[in-house]
Amino acid sequence: MTFDEWKSAVEAYVDGPARTWAKTIEESGTVPQAVWDDLNEHGFLRLAAPRDYGGHGLTFVEYLQLLEKFAHMHGSMRVIVHVMNSLWRSVDSKATQEQREKFVLPLIAGRHRITFTLTEPNSGSGADIKTTARREGDEYVVNGEKWMIIFSDIADYFLLFCRLEGSSGGEGTLALLVPRTTPGLDIELMPPAMGITGTGHGHLRLKECCVPVSHRLGEEGDGLDVAFRGFLDPSRTAIGMTCVGAAARSLELAAGHAMNRVTFGQPLSKRQTIQMWLAEMATDIEAARRLCLYAAELFDQGKVISTQAAMAKLFGTEMLQRVTDKALQIHGGAGYFKSSEMERIYRDARMQRFEEGTSEIQKMVIVRDVLKRAQRHERSES
């Protein structure tokens, strides 16, 4: 299929079956297996994967343009499309050919599921991870905790990041594929979240959990490189674009409501305050879209995009909060009830502020680059 054909197919799905699924998910509180099957059968879960891996080979720029439309869907469906089109990169980044055939290709084909497993209860999402591993022969013995791990209820493997006992910082970090059936791994599902209805988040406890060395991606010390270069940079950019999509849908709903809602004898859209809000929302959305596409263009060129990805996610998530807040305000009380799509979007949107790192984490990434450039400038003038 050409990109234009994919675009038409996605638009038809989002405006058709996806709306029916959204109702089912909200009413049942679960994401049926049939949703996964439907998305997979349409080819939507391997859009960004290479053709020789069984994917559809779209560029990152092309994929993000489709992802913007996908983000008009229910938040849980958006997460499925985003994660499945992103996580294969992390696994593949350091995979041997044997690991590629065992883990990457089945993941892309939809035959099994892997979930990103970094966040811990007592540390951030980076070099301060506390989950440890010690090597004993052909196995690593892992101890520690992970939590808020999405798809914990259905994942076949956990792409788990830990560190060798006695190491610190980025040194000694490991990326291990841990089967959910591994003895010593206890998975406790967490309470339902405020939004993203039906996605199971888990609290993982690992006690003397033995994982084969053959399940390690890359070398000892490569863990954070697998996490950040393989997954987080493109994923943060993609989250920024999902914010664009959700915000664009919010603007559609708000503008439509403003034209149809009549008070004091005239539509809300005739009120100057409402007009100013709609203009601000549209401008915010377009600015976020451009940041995301710029980062994607650099990624397609093979460049490191850590700073641009952090900017795209920071601005995108903050923008989404501004836009959804104004959109809900335009809807008034009617938008606050469960019967309103705007109510659901408002709940779903809050997750993206801390998905793949909070706004504060993004600022830390950005300021490191700012200070490095300032130091280079000072040296060049001295």
Image (spheres, rainbow, N blue to C red):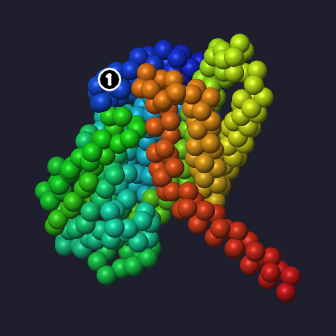
Which image quadrant: the N terminus?
top right
Mark 1 residue type:
Glu
Percent from the top left, x then y, of residue 334? 51, 23
| 345 with respect to 40 (left or right) | right
Q: How many marks?
A: 1
Placement of 5 over or under 90, stated as above or below: above
Q: Is residue 47 visible?
A: no
Q: Quadrant of residue 165?
A: bottom left
Q: Is residue 197 visible?
A: yes
Q: Nearer the viewer, residue 86 or 275?
A: 275
As drawn, the residue found furthest toward the bottom would be 382
| 35 with respect to 92 (left or right) | left
| 284 with respect to 182 (left or right) | right
Badge 1 is on which residue?
27
Query: Dot 1: within a 10 Å radius of its alpha carbon, few (fewer than 14), some, or many (20 or more) residues?
Result: few
Residue shown at 48% from the left, 23% from the top: 340
Q: Quadrant of residue 209?
A: bottom left
Which image quadrant: the C terminus?
bottom right
Percent from the top left, x then y, of residue 236? 54, 50
Percent from the top left, x then y, of residue 29? 30, 30
Residue shown at 72% from the left, 15% from the top: 266
Q: Nearer the viewer, residue 85 or 216?
A: 85
| 100 with respect to 340 (left or right) | left
Q: Nearer the viewer, residue 195 or 58?
A: 195
Residue shown at 17% from the left, 65% from the top: 207
Element at label 1 = helix
As drawn, the residue found furthest toward the front would be 264
Q: Nearer the viewer, residue 146 or 228?
A: 146
Placement of 303 over or under 352, stated as above or below: below
As drawn, the residue found furthest toward the right would be 381
Q: Quadrant of residue 120?
A: bottom left
